Image: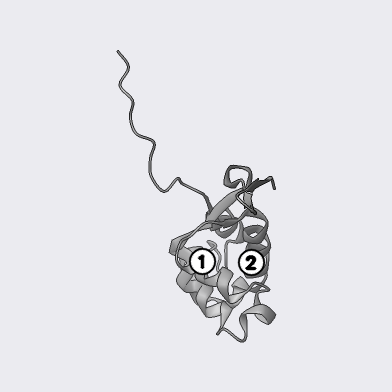
Amino acid sequence: MAEKWIEGVFAVDQKKQRMCIVNPDLVDEIGHLVGGQCEIMTRIGISWNSWTKIASGLPVRHSLAHRFKARVLAAADRSEGFRRKFPLPGGGLDYVALDDAFLLPNMPARPEPNVLRP
């Protein structure tokens, strides 16, 4: 991560950080696996602050998102919601489909303005 000294503080260069979003369509099902504020670290291994970012649809670091995804996938068989959204034809949970749908790219907050060229 690149840092720059600006007016007495280090500023992190946001362009250098790889960020992504956990699919908002999966947050309700994930919430059942997370538990409460006291249980989240032991159940899923992330902080409550990280969970509130994920649940709000905010971008998180790529490394955190992949760690979170691995832990949720390990516990996904306990979620009836995941089995309904990602069913296997013979029954059970389609882990490949869940894995593919889990993370989304970080979209810019505002699209770049269209520039008209003469």
Residue in the image at 51% along x and 49% along y: 106
- Percent position of residue 97, x then y: 55, 56
Q: Badge 1 is on which residue?
A: 53
Eye-nearest disc, 1 or 2: 1
Up-down relation of residue 82 to residue 38 (above or below)? above
Amino acid type of the residue that numbered disc 1 sits on in the rendered structure: Lys
Q: Which structural element holds mark 1?
A: helix
Which badge, 1 or 2, is on the more N-terminal residue?
1
Answer yes or no: is residue 118 visible.
yes
Q: Which colour scheme appears in the figure?
A: one colour
Q: Please give the label number shown on residue 96.
A: none
Q: Badge 2 is on which residue?
A: 73
CB-based contact (under 8 Å), mark 1 and mark 2: no
Residue in the image at 38% along x and 40% along y: 111
Tally of marks? 2
Amino acid type of the residue that numbered disc 2 sits on in the rendered structure: Leu
Residue in the image at 48% along x and 68% along y: 55
Q: Is residue 29 left or right of residue 111?
A: right
C-alpha span from label 1 to label 2: 19 Å
Of all residues shown, which one is farthest toward the front?
A: 7
Taking depth in this image into account, of 37 and 69 the one nearest to the observer is 37
- Percent position of residue 109, x then y: 41, 48
Up-down relation of residue 54 to residue 62 (above or below)? below
Quadrant occupied by the C terminus:
top left
- Percent position of residue 15, x then y: 58, 42
Q: Sort mark 1 into few (<14), some (14-19) or many (20+) by Cα contacts within 10 Å.
A: some
Of all residues shown, which one is farthest toward the top?
A: 118
Up-down relation of residue 16 to residue 48 (above or below)? above
Taking depth in this image into account, of 72 and 112 the one nearest to the observer is 112
- Percent position of residue 96, x then y: 61, 56
